[in-house]
Amino acid sequence: MTTSRPLPRWDMTTVYPGLETPEFAEGFAQTVQNIADLAHLFDQYAIGEKPSLPVEDALIQVFETITTHYNTVQEDTRTLTAYINSFILTDSQNKIAQARMSELQGALVTLSLLATRYTAWVGSLNIENLIQHTQIARDHAYALYRAKEQARHLMLPGEEALTAELNVSNGTAWARLHGNITSQLVVDVEIDGQHKELPMSAVRNLAYDKSRAVRTMAYTAEIKGWERVAVPLVAALNSIKSEVLVTTKRRQWPSPLDASLWVNSIDQQILETMLVAARAAFPAFRRYLHTKARALNLTRLAWYDLFAPIGNSNRLWEFEEAATFIIEQFGTYSPRLSNFAARAFRERWIDAEPRAGKRDGALCMWLCGDQSRVMANFKPAFAGVSTLAHELGHGYHNLNLTRRTSLQRSHPMTLAETASIFCETIIRQAALKQANRQEQVVILEAALQGTCQIVVDISSRFLFEQRVFEKRKQRELSIEELNQLMVETQRETYGDGLDEEILHPYMWAVKQHYYNANRSYYNYPYMFGQLFGLGLYARYQQEPEAFKQGYDELLSSTGMADAATLAARFGIDLRSEAFWQNSLDIIRHDIDQFEVAVEEMGI
């Protein structure tokens, strides 16, 4: 199906008619006031400022009042933040949205301080006794025990307050600088003999072009673009990593990685077991890369060949066709999943159009109630369909969290990919069954592109971040040093799968995940999510009906138990290398299929 319709932009009017409307102004003011009222309530009961009372009627009433109000304010604030961010994500030059977000920062700092006070207060309570006396405590038992553990790593109240206030002009400001620079970066490229000024997101999309000359040109232009903005970005990265090291030490975590593991609800043993299994799969991924090189008539892939299309399939997946396919195939799992996707497309929850000022990549964010919003930069290829299915999986996860409170919804990144990988796999398997041999090559290649990034490239990013933290303990790192570290880790992971002389030294500038002072190691959770999601899909294939009975409840509970506990519900031992190897075997099977298909097609 071919269509000339413009790609959709998301509809945010379900929250407010616009940023300059009386409704938004009233909602903004009300949210800020609600945060102030919550702060007054905390002061009234001296939350986190003195030892708590014994568990008796007075304390139970205070706990229920504080927790109920805290949940409500957190939820309302998330909606307002998501609403404003929806304009910034799609147009970083929107001065009104930028101004309102800046204006909101003060209230967000206050709420962050209240969160710290709540954690410290809970840490002083007798949780076991409290749970016996109030249903609200029983409903939030996991969050309360987590808060008690976190309280052990809090600085003194004044230090936590100062850190939160300074973060607005430190980590948060540096991250915002990275987002603004990268989304507004315009690069000069030469296409068909004509020079054009294109946004960086569009230039990076040229990595998918059939012409190697275009890909080479785009890569060269991209690197030059990053060189132009490297000075402010290296300052941002150095500052953020220094801030993380300082706060980690003051909070008495052994390292940023230890703090990250706790945040992500796994332990060092689980992480190392997964990474060992991943490293054992590197030879299979290199085999995939060698096969792709042969299909492109190349001796070795260069970095700019990683996303090159192969095969002769002329099928274009237009957006409307992608929507229909996703809705239908989600229906093979359950009507609930299918109806959810249909609603997302029907009610314009998706912003699919690439354009200047819009952030690159794709994401899904919870908006309000049972609604989410998906940002994508849609390409009319199977990869674009897969990305939509992936992000809608996040939305389905949010749907299952609807009945949970804000405290109960707070789940780790390791479990955030659970539904997205599952939904993506449903789409890929369905597409493979319907495709002819040529199309199978294209679909398998798109899938392997993604898994190679998740397993191999994520490994390089993890090693890079580890080494940056180690070196940043002594001093700032230069642009050249960051480039060298990036290339070094890419060589270690990709090995002879890529031309070692043509890698991507500026990947540290590309990936916004490095620029989050509150969430270090924003990389290995994606690998965990990918392999955990594949493992769950394997369970689904083995026992479909039994799996369906527990899957939605698992998604609903991702903020109410740690990863190992939830996995055990499906008979999965995360500390066993066998589980991770089984998940990677699914990918190895795809690589085997890809090799056979490429050989049969004589590509």
Image (cartoon, rainbow, N blue to C red):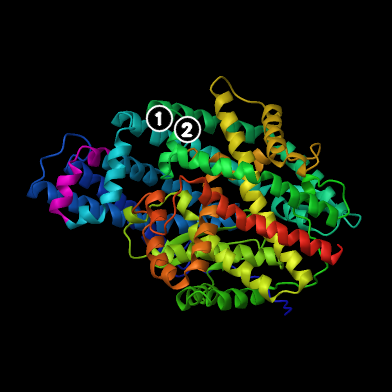
Residue positioned 70% across, 49% down in the render: 285
Q: Which mark is residue 188?
A: none
Q: Which residue is mark 1?
A: 253
Q: Is residue 70 visible?
A: yes
State the image quarter where residue 469 is shown. top right
> Which amino acid does the dot numbered 1 rest on?
Trp
Compared to residue 94, the image places residue 351 above or below, namely: below
Residue positioned 61% across, 55% down in the render: 585
487 or 512, which is in the foreground? 487
On the rendered structure, is 236 left or right of 229?
left
State the image quarter where residue 79 is shown. bottom left
33 or 182, which is in the foreground? 182
Q: Which element carries disc 1, helix, strand or loop? A: loop
What kind of secondary structure does the magenta stretch mostly adopt? helix
Residue 405 lies in the magenta stretch: no
Q: Which element carries disc 2, helix, strand or loop? A: helix
Residue 133 lies in the magenta stretch: yes
The N terminus appears in which quarter of the rendering?
bottom right
On the rendered structure, is 109 left or right of 392?
left
Q: Which mark is residue 256?
A: 2
Most distant residue in the top direction:
474
Verify CB contact (< 8 Å) between mark 2 and mark 1.
yes
Region in magenta: 120-134
The C terminus appears in which quarter of the rendering?
bottom right
Compared to residue 63, the image places residue 391 above or below, namely: below
